[in-house]
């Protein structure tokens, strides 16, 4: 029984950290993809730059949607984790 208490305590301490790492990774992935695509622009022709601009706008919209979903997930999981601890 003391071993289970130790495992549950460690689990409750680690959960907010894993949530933060997941949220940070999702934010960095979107920014990194936009940056990598933006850095290839100067070496492209005008036709490809137009396609790249459209692709970046679409990715920006997608990243905004992911940010809204992640904020919802963060709020829900934070509420669940805090209700478990108390």
Image (tube, rainbow, N blue to C red):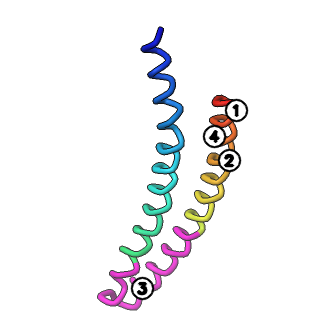
In the rendered image, residue 52 lying in the magenta stretch gets the answer yes
Q: Position of residue 4 (x, y in %)?
A: 47, 15
* C-alpha separation, residue under disc 4 versus residue under disc 1: 10 Å
Nearer the viewer's eye, disc 4 or disc 1?
1
* C-alpha separation, residue under disc 2 versus residue under disc 1: 12 Å
Residue bearing mark 2: 75
Q: Secondary structure at mark 4?
A: helix
Q: Are marks 2 and 1 in contact (CB under 8 Å)?
A: no
Nearer the viewer's eye, disc 2 or disc 1?
1
Q: Secondary structure at mark 2?
A: helix
Q: Earlier in the sequence, mark 2 or mark 1?
A: 2
Q: Earlier in the sequence, mark 2 or mark 3?
A: 3
Q: Are marks 4 and 2 in contact (CB under 8 Å)?
A: yes
Front one among 64 and 24: 24
Image: 4 above or below 13: above
Residue bearing mark 3: 49
Q: Position of residue 67 (x, y in %)?
A: 60, 59
> Outermost residue, top direction?
1
Q: Earlier in the sequence, mark 3 or mark 1?
A: 3
């Amino acid at each position: 029984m003391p071993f289970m208490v130790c495992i549950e305590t460690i689990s409750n301490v680690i959960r907010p950290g894993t949530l933060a790492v997941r949220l940070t990774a999702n934010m960095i992935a979107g920014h990194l993809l936009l940056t990598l695509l933006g850095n290839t622009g100067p070496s492209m022709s005008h036709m490809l730059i137009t396609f790249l601009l459209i692709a970046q706008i679409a990715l920006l919209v997608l990243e905004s949607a992911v940010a809204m979903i992640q904020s919802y997930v963060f709020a829900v999981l934070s509420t669940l984790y805090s209700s478990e601890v108390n």
